[in-house]
Amino acid sequence: MRLRNVKNAKEIVGLSEFVIKNPIIYKKKFKNLFKNNNDIHIEIGIGKGKFIYEMAKKYPNINFIGIEKYESIIIRAIEKINKEPLPNLKLIVMDAKNLNEVFEHEISCIYLNFSDPWPKNRHEKRRLTSNEFLKIYENIFKDKKTIIQKTDNIILFASSIKSFNNYGYKIDDITLDLANYNIPNIETEYEVKFKNLGYKINYIKVSKE
């Protein structure tokens, strides 16, 4: 899903009170933005925003920030928040490669839901669980580092496990069939679609002290 040419997307994003327009100014100061010291969780690549919106609604004592590269995609999340604003949810339009410009030792958990698998070997560095991205995440985590990933792509999943292991993460939880695994789970739009088509959803939670 890449809705890159939605009419008036830039204007809609610019007018939204839920989108942080100049996130760099909040670096090391996001507690001031949320007006509390609660943990901050981020989702990289939020799609239409179903997952992060429902997470923020379910866990009001956690602050959530959705990261999305494309304005034409993030407006779908804006539409959801407009219907029922949540004080613990904000959005940022940015490339994940630039996370270090915005965050520094402030994030407690990262969600990677159905990220682009970049299946070709020459594109391995673009995967959000590659060593290149794990290095970026290292500096934005506050103390204990936690990453939770969901994907239908077994190649990406295997590659992620290898990267996590090489970077010193330990596996806290894992399954190749999330729909039949007994853990709390809020589904993404993709997850609902793929599950209905009979695809198995891979899930992993890793952490590092």
Image: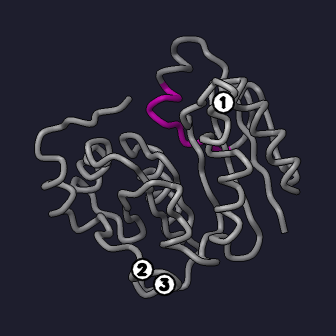
Disc 2 from disc 1: Cα separation: 40 Å
Q: Specify few, some or many for label 3: CA neighbours under 10 Å numbering under 14, 14-19, or 20 or more.
A: some
Identify the secondary structure beneath mark 2: helix
Secondary structure at numbered mark 1: helix
Residue for badge 1: 122
How many other residues sit within 10 Å of disc 2, few (<14), some (14-19) or many (≥20)?
A: some
Identify the residue shown where x is 39% and y is 49%.
69
Amino acid type at image mark 3: Lys
The quadrant in which the N terminus is found is top left
Which residue, given by chain and number where applicable, does mark 3 sit on?
Answer: 31
Residue 62: x and y in percent read 54, 69
Left or right, 179 with reference to 5: right
Is the residue marked by circle 1 packed among few (<14), some (14-19), or many (20+) residues within 10 Å? few
Q: Is residue 190 magenta?
A: yes
Which kind of residue does numbered mark 1 sit on? Arg
Q: In this figure, what is the number of numbered marks?
A: 3
Dot in front, 3 or 1? 1
Which range is magenta? 184-192
Q: Which residue, as the protein is rendered here, is positioned at the far front?
A: 122
Quadrant of the image containing the C terminus: bottom right
Mark 2 or 1 closer to N-term?
2
Q: Which is more toward the observer, 38 or 90? A: 90
